[in-house]
Amino acid sequence: MSDHPPFAVTVDLAVFTIRDGALAVLLVERGADPFAGSWALPGGFVEPQEDAENAAWRELLEETGVERFDGHLEQLRTYSAPDRDPRMRVVSVAHVAFAPDLPEPEAGSDAAGARWWAVDDVLGEGPDRPALAFDHDEILTDARERVRAKLEYTTLALDFVAEPFTLPELRRVYAAVWGVAPDLGNFRRKVLGTDGFVVPTDGQGGATSAGGRPPLLYRRGDATVIQPPMLRTAGD
């Protein structure tokens, strides 16, 4: 018999999209203890026959009805505080995922509810801030910062927009994720001056409200890195 206490591995998934101009995260309402009635990131125990990534996609589908999508997914970090789960010693491999136009969730499995929340409402100080289970406020905070930082030096903002897109639509991604829009001139220089960031198409967007020339449409290029980076404004 092993001298080690019971030990389990779980996954948690911070899924982001842009909704109504704001960065939104997918949360589930826990239907069972521990933390019944609290909101949490989708996740659960890793089965013996699966790896962490497949477990993350499975739990996402089981708890929210959201199927595996073609957007970005990466591991965030491992959370292993001894007291993070009251049931036993549980280590969580957290993931970050995002894509445009993700669907409305439907609660399943042991979830009592599922919905999109504006990240600022979840991590803010308002009276309607939901109570997050386990250490999910820490995971969500880290996940948001990971995405914010990656938008500075990579082209992953493109994974938040559907093709084709306009430059104003792409700039609104930065505004939603960072909380402030990047300087217009610097934004255009970085996007159009980075070889392979975006590729123009033959189409144009709809007419502007002021009746001006419709904006050009673009698709993503093959560039992955912005060098030098497009830094956030100090204080963001």
Image (cartoon, rainbow, N blue to C red):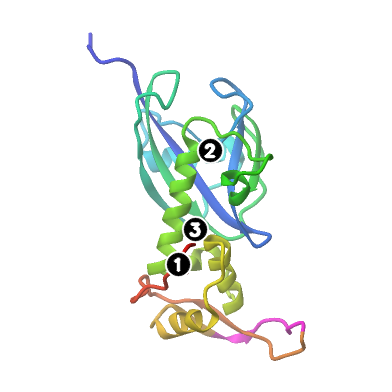
Q: Which residue is mark 1?
A: 234
Q: Is residue 61 left or right of residue 198?
A: right
Residue 13: % across, % down: 48, 43
State the residue at coordinates (35%, 71%).
Answer: 225
> Residue furthest toward the top?
1
Numbered disc 1: secondary structure: loop
Q: Look at the image and tell me whether residue 83 can be seen.
A: yes
Q: CA distance from mark 1 to mark 2?
A: 33 Å
Q: Which residue is mark 3?
A: 71
Between residue 42 and residue 179, name the one nearer to us.
Answer: 179
Looking at the rendered image, the disc whose residue lies closer to the viewer, 2 or 3, is: 2
> Residue furthest toward the bottom?
213
The earlier-in-sequence mark between 3 and 1 is: 3
Numbered disc 2: secondary structure: loop
Between residue 178 and residue 39, name the one nearer to us.
Answer: 178
The earlier-in-sequence mark between 2 and 3 is: 2
Residue 56: % across, % down: 45, 40
Q: Is residue 154 left or right of residue 130?
A: left
Q: CA distance from mark 2 to mark 3?
A: 17 Å
Which residues, given as a range, are shown in magenta?
201-209
Between residue 233 and residue 117, name the one nearer to us.
Answer: 233
State the residue at coordinates (41%, 67%).
Answer: 152
Looking at the rendered image, the disc whose residue lies closer to the viewer, 3 or 1, is: 1
Residue 156: % across, % down: 44, 65
The earlier-in-sequence mark between 1 and 2 is: 2
Would you call the spot at circle 3 few (<14 residues within 10 Å), some (14-19), or many (20 or more)? Answer: some
Q: CA distance from mark 3 to mark 1?
A: 29 Å
* Viewport quadrant of the N terminus: top left
Q: Which residue is mark 2?
A: 42
